Amino acid sequence: KMWKAGRWPFWSGRMTCDDLYRRLTEHAEGVLEGKICEEVDRHLAQCPACNEIRQDLQDLSRLCREQVAVQLPLGVRRRIEGLLGSTA
C-alpha cells in the first residue's frame, strides 16, 4: 500500500514523520548532531513513506548537479542584450 507522506502517523520512538520533514535537509547535508541524526536514521529505516521522500530528494539533488548549462547562440544573446539595453 502506498502511504501519503505526512498522513501516516508513524512513530519510531520520539520522531514523527512531521518531525523528520523538518530535519531531512539537515540530515542530507550531514549537519545534524549525533542523537538527532541517529533518530532520523532510525525513522528512515522503519518508515517507507519518509524513506521514499528522502530518496526523491536525493534523486532531485543528483539531477540538479548533473544538469548541463545551455549556452545561447551569440546572435540570440546580442539581440536580447540589445532589447534589454533599449528599455533601460
Image: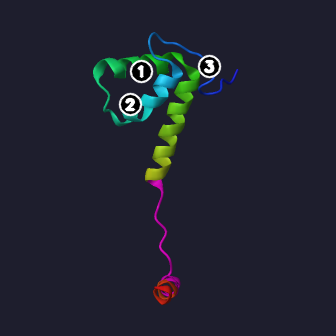
The residue at the point 45 percent across, 30 percent down is 22
**Residue 72 highlighted magenta (yes or no):** yes
Q: Which mark is residue 56?
A: none
The quarter of the picture where residue 26 lies is top left
> Of tags 2 and 3, which is closer to the observer?
3
Place of residue 47 in the rendered image (x, y in percent of width and height, measured from the top left) = 54, 19
Q: Position of residue 2 (x, y in %)?
A: 68, 24
Q: CA distance from mark 2 to mark 3?
A: 21 Å
Residue at image mark 2: 27
What residue range appears in magenta?
66-80
Of 82 and 29, nearer the camera is 82
- Residue at left 66%, top 23%? 3
Q: Earlier in the sequence, mark 2 or mark 3?
A: 3
Q: Which residue is mark 3?
A: 8
Q: Which mark is residue 41?
A: 1
Seen as rendered, the residue at the extreme front is 88
Q: In terms of sequence position, does the residue under pointer 3 or pointer 1 come before the other?
A: 3
For marks 3 and 1, give the one nearer the viewer.
3
What residue appears at the point 50 percent right and 86 percent down from the top-left corner?
Answer: 87
